[in-house]
């Protein structure tokens, strides 16, 4: 009934109990999740693929899909060999998206000009691979700088291809959400929608049409209330659905059903599964 559209479960924080985390997710109605392929940099961007392969066909766990990409934090580590490897990984049958990619002006772990260059390069690669993109966008304090640059580059370099994408862990304003929707993107909300100071995110969640919305955890980060301060996990995506349901006057189950349908429809996964069945 629920899908976690964005989580990072490959890290050391899950090494001791990853099986239990995934089993708990399935027991709580999370039928699938998207394993984000950033890892610790370009050399480990197949981490989502590895998880998808490891847990494939095991009914006691959610189904795992994967992405590949270089996060803006590690943009300065990417080179031609990295991008060539990403192109190879992007052909894996479990890979359904390119990302997360974008701009992060809050930490500036990579210089901004290099972040932009990596973003543009990866939009080209994703277009060639016919994959939608997953966007990470974080401005510096009290600024819209990263939003303006990120949305501008998407408008100039991406939208004409019609592949769309996801504004992951949306933290912008209502206006940023409108621009993202106009550019053909899905808007995904994470556990920070439950935080007391996140009224801008709740305002956006009231605006975004229910057929353009996804929910996620961004595990291990941003555990929602009442789990704030803990390590996040896919089972907690139900709290995101609960918050959105309160805002929209419906039930968490309804939000789960709608966002699950949105996930399958956006990524055309029903068609992928049917095609795979025909080839079997």
Image: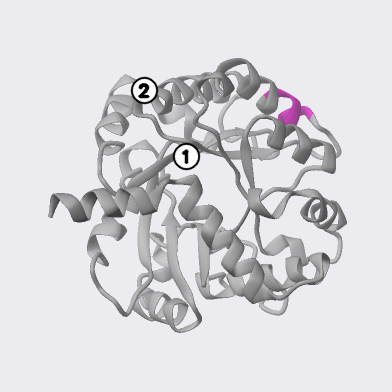
Residue 144 in percent (x, y) is at 81, 32
Graded by Cα atoms within 10 Å as few (under 14), some (14 to 19) or many (20 or more), the crowding at tag 2 reads few
Any mark on residue 128, and which? Answer: 2
Which quadrant, please, contains the C terminus? bottom left
Q: Which mark is residue 112?
A: none
x 49%, y 31%: residue:
163
Q: Secondary structure at mark 1?
A: strand
* Place of residue 49 in the rendered image (x, y in percent of width and height, measured from the top left): 30, 51
Q: Is residue 229 visible?
A: no
**45 over 214 or under it: above or below:** above
140 above or below 156? below
Question: Which numbered disc flags the more N-terminal residue, 2 or 1?
Answer: 1
Which percent across, then down, holds residue 133?
A: 50, 36
Find the magenta span and give its range. 145-149
* Foreground: disc 2 or disc 1: 2
Q: In which quarter of the view is residue 229 placed?
A: bottom right
Q: Residue furthest top?
A: 156
Main SS, magenta region, reads helix
Of residue 263 and residue 91, the one placed in the foreground of this image is: 263
Is residue 86 visible in the rendered image? The answer is: yes
Q: Crowding at label 1, few (<14), some or many (≥20) Cα neighbours within 10 Å? A: many
Q: Which residue is mark 1?
A: 99
């Amino acid at each position: 009934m629920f899908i976690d559209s964005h989580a990072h479960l490959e890290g050391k924080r899950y090494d001791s109990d990853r099986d239990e985390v995934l089993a708990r997710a399935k027991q709580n109605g999370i039928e699938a999740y998207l394993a984000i392929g950033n890892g610790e940099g370009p050399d480990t961007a197949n981490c989502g693929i590895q998880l998808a392969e490891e847990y494939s066909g095991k009914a006691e766990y959610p189904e795992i899909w994967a992405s590949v990409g270089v996060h803006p934090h590690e943009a300065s580590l990417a080179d031609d060999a990295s991008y060539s490897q990403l192109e190879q990984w992007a052909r894996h049958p479990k890979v359904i998206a390119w990302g997360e990619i974008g701009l992060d002006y809050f930490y500036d772990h990579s210089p901004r000009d290099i972040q932009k260059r990596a973003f543009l390069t990866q939009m080209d690669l994703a277009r060639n691979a016919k994959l939608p993109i997953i966007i990470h966008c974080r401005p510096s304090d009290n600024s819209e700088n990263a939003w303006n640059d990120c949305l501008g580059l998407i408008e100039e370099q991406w939208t004409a291809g019609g592949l769309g994408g996801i504004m992951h862990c949306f933290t912008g304003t209502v206006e940023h959400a409108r621009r993202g929707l106009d550019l053909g993107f899905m808007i995904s909300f994470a556990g920070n929608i439950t935080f007391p100071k996140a009224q801008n995110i709740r305002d956006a969640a009231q605006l975004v049409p229910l057929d353009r919305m996804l929910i996620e955890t961004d595990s291990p980060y941003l555990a929602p209330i009442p789990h704030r301060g803990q390590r996040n996990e896919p089972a907690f995506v139900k709290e995101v659905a609960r918050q959105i349901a309160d805002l929209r006057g419906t039930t968490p189950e309804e939000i789960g059903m709608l966002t699950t349908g949105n996930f399958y429809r956006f990524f055309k996964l029903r068609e992928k599964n049917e095609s795979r069945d025909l080839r079997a």
